Amino acid sequence: MPGDITINICMGTGGIAAGGEAVMSAFEDALASADIAASVKKHCAAHKVGCRGFCARDVLVDVIENGGKHTYEYIKPDMVKRIVEEHLAGGQPVQEWLVKEDYHTFHGKQVRAVLADCGEMDPEDIEAYAGRGGYEAALKSLTSLAPTDIIEELKRSGLRGRGGAGFPTGLKWEMARNEPGDTKYIICNADEGDPGAFMDRSLVEGNPHAVIEGMLIGAYAIGAQRGYVYIRAEYPLAVQRLTIALGQARERGFLGRNIQNTGFDFDIKVKLGAGAFVCGEETALIASIEGNRGMPRAKPPFPAQKGLWGKPTVINNVETLANVPYIMRKGSGWFAGFGTEKSKGTKVFALTGKIRNSGLIEVPFGISLREIIFDIGGGIEGDRKLKAVQTGGPSGGCIPASLMETSVDYESLASAGSIVGSGGMVVLDETDCMVNVAKYFLEFTKSESCGKCIPCRVGTMRLLEILTRITSGKGRPGDVELLQELSEDIKMTSLCGLGQTAPNPVLSTIRYFKDEYDAHIIERRCPAGVCKSFIAFTVLEEFCKGCMACVRVCPSGAIVGEKKKPHRIVQDVCIKCGACFATCKFQAVRKRAVYGEIHTR
Amino acid sequence: MEKPINSISLVIDGKQISVPSGTTILDAAKQVGITIPALCYHPKVSRSGACRVCIVEVGGTLVTACTTPVSGGMEVITNSPYVENMRRDLIDLILSDHPYDCMVCQKTGECELQELAYKYSIRNPVFRGERRQYAQKDGNPFIDRDMEKCILCGRCVKICDEVQGVGAIDFAYKGFWAKVCPPFEQDLNCEFCGQCVMVCPTGALIGKNWVARGRYWNMREVESTCPYCGVGCTLSLHVKENEIVRVTAKEGRGVNDGLLCVKGRFGYQFVSSPDRLKTPLIRRRKGGDLEPATWDEALGVVASRLKRVKEQYGPDAIAGLSSARCTTEDNYLFQKFMRAAVGTNNVDHCARL
C-alpha cells in the first residue's frame, strides 16, 4: 500500500551468519514499541528475504517506501534504533550506512532473471511468491497447455542444463516423455558439491517455490507422478525452507492429488544426501535415493530411459528447474533474448577468490570474464595482478589473465580448456601458485572418488602424488609429461563425469602455466612464493625493532629473541605458516626462496 | 541362415557381423573370435564397467565393450595402438597398487591380472606411489581375503548378491581406500559357498586349504560328482600325488554350471582322512569293539536281524530313513525295499526332518 514501509532483511545462510536474526528481532522489537509506532505513523513490516548476492556486505537491509529503495550494509542490531528513528520516523535515510557506489557497480552488469524474486520476498511465504506471479505458469501449463507444448516452448527457449553438462532441457524432457511406461520420475539435483559453490543453496533458500513450480511443470510435461529433491543434509536452512514450501504448496493445492482440479497428481519427497560429491552424478544420485551406495553406473541406458527404480527419470539441477516457471510465464522469447547463439539465458555464478566484491551473481551468457571480474567484481583485492580465473570447480580449468575477453558460455569456456560447470568462479592473483591450485583440486577429487573405476580411483591418487612431489621440491624431469599422459588416461577411460573431468585443473594449468611447473621442477622455486618447500622466512636484523609481535603470533614457537633486540627464526622449527610475515609492521620478516633438494628419477 | 528379425549389423576389427539387438560389443566380438580383455566382466553377474580394461574405439571415442550395446553400422576397433596404450596404462595403474609377489602368490598362472601384465609386458609400472596395506587379516575358516590384492572389480560383491542371494560383502570407504568387506569389517561370516573365490580374477580371494598345496600346473584335473547331496554337482578334483588338493567346478558342466556350496568346495578332506571307514564294521559280541568285516558278512547280519524283528514284531516294527545325500535312484530303491521286501510304509527321508 502507498505510504507503507517494507523492510527486507537478508536471511540467507550468509545473512544469518552475519547476525541477520538479531537484526530482524531488533527491527521487530522497535516496530512493536508504542512510541515508535506513534512516531513513524506508517505501517511498517519487516520481512526476512533470501540471498541478495552480496554476502560480504551482510547484514543487508532494504527499506522500501513508495517504490523507492534504500539499502543499508553491514547492519548490526545496535544500528537499528537509529535507522528506525531517522529513516522510518524522520524520513531521512542514514547516509553513512547506506551502500556505496561499488554496491551499484556490483549489480550494474547483472541480469536477475532466475534470481528475480530471490532476496526480494519472504521465501517462507507462498503468498509472497504468488503475489509476484508465482504458480501462474504452473496453472497455465496444467490447464491450457499440452505437455508437448511445454516441451516445445522449452526447446525454443534454448535452456540448457545448469548443473554443468549443458544438455538441452527440452530435449531431455522429450526423451523421458517418449519413453513407454506409466510410472516416471522427476528429480531435482540439489547436491551442490563444488568447493566454494553456493548457487543452488541460495536459490533453494531464497525461492524454494520456483524450484517446486519448475518440478511441477516438468512432471506434467513428462508424465511423472512423483518427484524427489536430492539435497545435502549440510544445507539445513535450504532443507527447512524447502520443507515449509512443500507444505504450503500442498495446502494451496499445487501438490498432491487432483492439482487445481486438473486431475493431475504429483507430489515431491525430500531425500537428504550425506555429502558425497559423486552423488551429484545422476546415476550415483539415483543409486543413493534407492538406498544403495552412491556409485555411478555405466550409461546407456540413460536415466531418461531407465532411471530411478528402473523407470524413465528426468534429473535437473536446481537452477534449471527454477528457470522453468519464469520461461513459461515470460515466454521463450524473453529468455532467449539473453545470452549467445548456443547458450541462452543467464547463469548464476558464485564469484569468490581474490576479488574485491565476492558473492552470488547472475549474468547473461556472453558476458566477458573481464566484465565479471573488473566491473561486477570490482577488480582484484589489494590491486594485485590478476593471474587466472578458475571456473567449474574441480571439474573445470584455469583460464589465464590473457584470455579475459573470453565470452562466458558453454562453448567458449570449453575451448579455453575449462567449463561453465555448475557455476563456481574463483579468481586467482599473482600470489597464487598454479601447481598448488591444481593440487588443491586433485586433493578434492581424489578423496571424493567413489573408488569404482580404476582410472579415477588409482589415477587421481597418482596425479596428486606427482603434484605433491613437484610442490614439495622433489619434482623430476618428465613429471609434466607423466601428468599429461596420466590425465589423458583418466579423462578418456573413467566411468563417470567425476573422473572424466578430474584432470582438467591439471591439464589447464599445464596448458597455460607450464613455466610455473618448470620453475618448480627445474629451477626449484615457486614463483608465487606459496609452496613451503621453496620458501623460508627470515628476520632482517636492521629492520627489526624487537617488538615481539611476531613471537606472539608464531604458532610453533620458532621465533626467538628478547624485547628491543632483533629476533631470529629457527628454521628447523618454522612451519612456514606466514603469520610473522603478515604481522610484522616494519617489513623485517622477509620471505625468500630456497632451493629444494635435487632429485633425479 | 535367416537373419533374426531385429538383428544389428556392425563391423568389429574389419569383420562384418550381425547380432540380436541388445547384445554388447564384448559378446558380439566373442562371436567372431575376438577376445577383448576384461577384469570386472563375468558372465554370471550383471555388467559393471568398473575396470575399464575392455575399452574399445567407436567413432573416435572410447567405450567399454562390456556395457555398450551394439548399434547399427557401428565400427568397432578393439586393438588400435591408442586403445592398447590406454589398456596398458590401466593395467599399469592397477599394478602400481598391487603387491609384486607373484612368485609366492597362490593365484600365479591362473591370475587374470598377471596374464594382462604379461601381455602388456609391464615389468615396472610407470606410475608409482602409495600402495594400500592392511594389517588386519580375516579369521574366517575357509577364505583367505587379501584385500591388498583386490582390484575392486566387484565380481565377488555381485555374485554373492545376485547369484547366491546372500549379500555378505559390499564396498566400504571411498576412492583409493575403497574396500570390499563384510559389515563393520568383521571376519567373514557367511555360507562360505566360495562363489566369490571362484570369480575373483586375482589372488585376493583364495581357499585357505589350497594355500601352498601346489601349483595348478602340477595338478591333474579329474571330473567327479559331489557325494554330499542328491543334486549331484559336477566337481573338478585337482589331484596332486594322488591326493585332492583343491576342488573347483567348471562353467557349463553339470547341473551346477560352475557353482558349488561350502561342502562341495571346501569339504573334501575326508577323502584322504585316516579316520575314514574302508570296510563295514560289526560288533560281534555285546560290549565288544567294532571289528572289520566283509560286505557279505555285514549284509548277512543286517538281513538276518531285520528278518528276525519282522517275524517277532511284524513289519511295522521296522522303519527306514534314507538320505538326501543319496541319488533319486537310491532313494527309489530304498522305499521299494521297505515297502516290497520289508512290507512297511514306515519310510522317511532326512530332508523332511
Image (tube, rainbow, N blue to C red):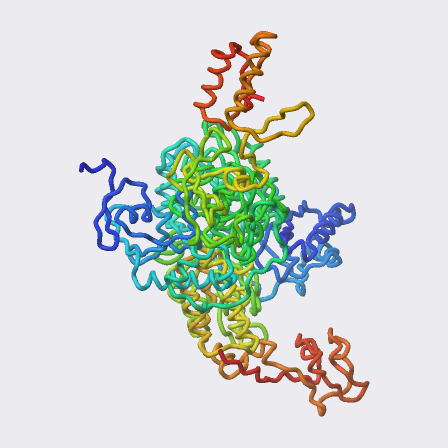
How many marks overall? 0
Q: Is residue A130 visible?
A: no
Question: Could you tell me if residue B332 is visible in this image?
Answer: yes
Q: In terms of depth relative to the viewer, which is nearer, B36 or A299?
A: B36
Q: Quadrant of the N terminus of chain A?
A: top right
**Left or right position of B301 against A412:** right
Please report the residue visible at 53 percent of the width from the left and 52 percent of the height from the top.
B211
Q: Residue furthest bottom?
A: A542
Say above or below: B46 vs A565: above
From what the image shows, is residue A119 above or below residue A180? below
Choose between A27 and B28: the one closer to the eye.
B28
Rendering coords of residue B24 (x, y %)? 33, 45
Q: Nearer the viewer, residue A371 or A69?
A: A371
Q: Does A334 sit above or below residue A490?
A: above
Give x and y (percent) for residue A3.
63, 47
Q: Residue furthest left?
A: B1
Q: Position of residue B85 (x, y in %)?
A: 36, 64
Residue B350: x and y, percent?
Answer: 56, 23
Q: Residue at x 41, y 33 (%)?
A: B255
